[in-house]
Amino acid sequence: MEEILEGLKLATARGESLQQAMQTFYNAGYNKEDIENAARALQEQQSIVAEMPDYESQQEKLKYPAGKTVQKVSEYAPKPSSKKKIFVIILIVLMLFVLGALAGILLFKEELLGFINKLM
């Protein structure tokens, strides 16, 4: 019965209805009475869990009573280095200069070749 119970838990956790999960076990050859007993046990467990207060919210209420604000002492987060920012800006400017020069060479290659030929 434990195997069936665990299987029903997994099936319902995946979003399958309890009836569908029970039918799957029945189709697999499990005893109908064992399946029904496991389903009852699962429903009992689920009703007990539903009645239990939310443990995490209870712990939060104990830590921080109502009306008190939580004050953070430090919001440590490493700030980006100004050296890194300057380095990135210089790289971007150089990249734009190189792209501009390349575009100029491609657009004015005939004039550049003529100018170089006159010099030699």
Image (cartoon, rainbow, N blue to C red):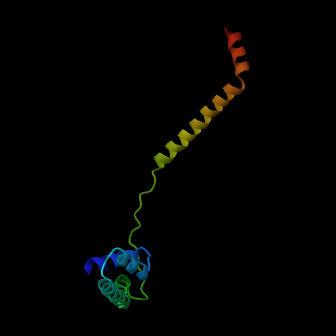
Residues 23 and 101: in front is 23
Outermost residue toward the top in this view: 120
Q: Position of residue 77 (x, y in %)?
A: 41, 61
Outermost residue toward the left in this view: 2
Instruction: Please name the residue shown 67% across and 25% down the image.
Output: 105
**Number of callouts:** 0
Q: In the rendered image, which quarter is residue 23 located in?
A: bottom left
Instruction: Please name the residue shown 68% across and 14% down the image.
Output: 116
Image quadrant containing the C terminus? top right
- Whether 28 is drawn above or below 114: the answer is below
Residues 54 and 33: in front is 33
Instruction: Please name the residue shown 42% across and 89% down the image.
Output: 66
Q: In the rendered image, which quarter is residue 101 located in?
A: top right
Query: Does residue 50 appear to the left or right of 31 in the view shown?
Result: right
Query: Does residue 49 appear to the left or right of 81 in the view shown?
Result: left
Instruction: Please name the residue shown 60% across and 32% down the image.
Output: 98
Q: Position of residue 6 (x, y in %)?
A: 30, 77
Q: Position of residue 81 (x, y in %)?
A: 45, 51
Image quadrant containing the N terminus? bottom left
Q: In the rendered image, which quarter is residue 71 located in?
A: bottom left
Query: Does residue 107 appear to the left or right of 78 in the view shown?
Result: right
Q: Position of residue 115 (x, y in %)?
A: 71, 15
